[in-house]
Amino acid sequence: MTKSLKNTILEEAISWIKSGQQVALATVVETWGSSPFQIGSKMIINEKGNFLGSVSGGCVETSVITECLELIKNKNSFKKIDFKVSDENAWDVGLACGGEMTVFIEQIN
Amino acid sequence: MKIETLKEIIKKKLSNEQFAVLTNLNNGSSEIFKLGTPISKNFINYKNEIQSYYNLKKSGIIDGTEIFIQNYIKPVEVIIVGAVHITQYLIQYLKDLNFNVIVVDPREYFITKQKFQNIKIINEWPEEFFKKIETSSNTALITLTHDPKIDEPALKYALEKKFFYIGALGSKKTHENRCKRLKEEGFNDEEIASIHGPIGIKIGGKSAPEIALSIVAQLIFETNKYKTI
């Protein structure tokens, strides 16, 4: 079954923006190996680092949030981030499952 | 992504139609795609590949490109016959799993007594209800009244229309009698065997939320099987 993401995350993004928050959207665009989350999984992050939804089982969320905060701060519009087990940061952001994934982050404006 | 695109996605999702969202990972542009609608110049060069991924309902980065496509498919429709206690828990689980749910029960007393929120409830006999709606093999049926005069017209309809999942609550004995009656009505053994009865996987539960969970587990298993065929 292709489980489509629930409306709530996207709807919440709209309500965050309406209340004056800056919002970045992170989407899993590619996975290899045993990444637990499927393509299309989403998470939203505001300028304070609050977030909703998820892109992995908790393995890369912290890193995605940091990247989104940078994106918002620098007023960049998008970035593609690859997460691999072999990264030099593997201890911090690597996927414990041994999978790899690419996350696309973008500002909503 | 533009907020307008985001609003459009939400609107399209609520309308339950198939569509896709395209994102160019090189320049960050995104737009909604639907078969038969024009594609902007950002994506026109990949028209054929986009259509092929769309038809396969496949999401991901299109091979050899920097185009990401996310397909939004029509959710599976689950028709529940019987507004009973188990139904309340079923609805909760099914909503989180993104199924579309309709509850049918001709007994007004049940519908008003049980608490159902934000759910489509039809106070009609199943045979009347099925005359009015359009179903497909993407539909599932769960019967929970174990009253033959309510459940069986629905089961017969689902068998004829080849619903991908049909489950009927009731003990082994109830189910045996049900199968006998369906056979007398002219359904063959294979059709009758396609009904999951007694419904649900065995988890040893007796309470309403446990039974609902066992039904949902079975439905998910069958849905995943069906979707990968």
Image (cartoon, rainbow, N blue to C red):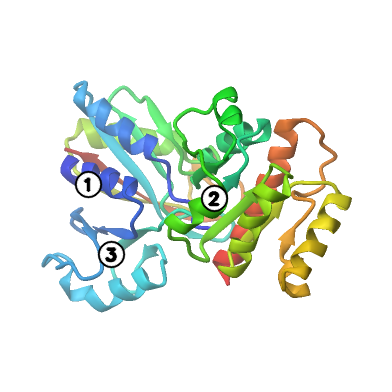
Which residue in the protein does label 3 denote? B67
> Closer to the N terminus: mark 3 or mark 1?
1
Give the number of callouts: 3
Vertical position of residue B114 compared to residue B133: above or below: above
Closer to the camera in the image, B56 or A34: B56
| Amino acid at pointer 3 | Ile
In this rendering, position of residue A105 left or right of residue B111: left
The mark lying in front, picked from 2 and 1, is 2
SS state under label 1: helix
* Labelled disc at residue A68: none
Which x, y percent locates residue A86?
52, 54
Name the residue beneath numbered marker 2. Answer: B78
Residue B8 is marked as 1
Chain that bears disc 3? B
Residue B131 at what x, y percent from top left? 47, 58
Which quadrant of the view contains residue B145?
top right
Frontmost of labels 3 and 2 is 2
Answer with mark 2 or mark 1, whichever residue precedes in sequence.
1
Q: What chain does mark 1 sit on? A: B
Question: Taking A56 as reference, is B84 left or right?
Answer: right
Residue found at the far right of this picture: B173
Left or right of A19? Residue B196 is right
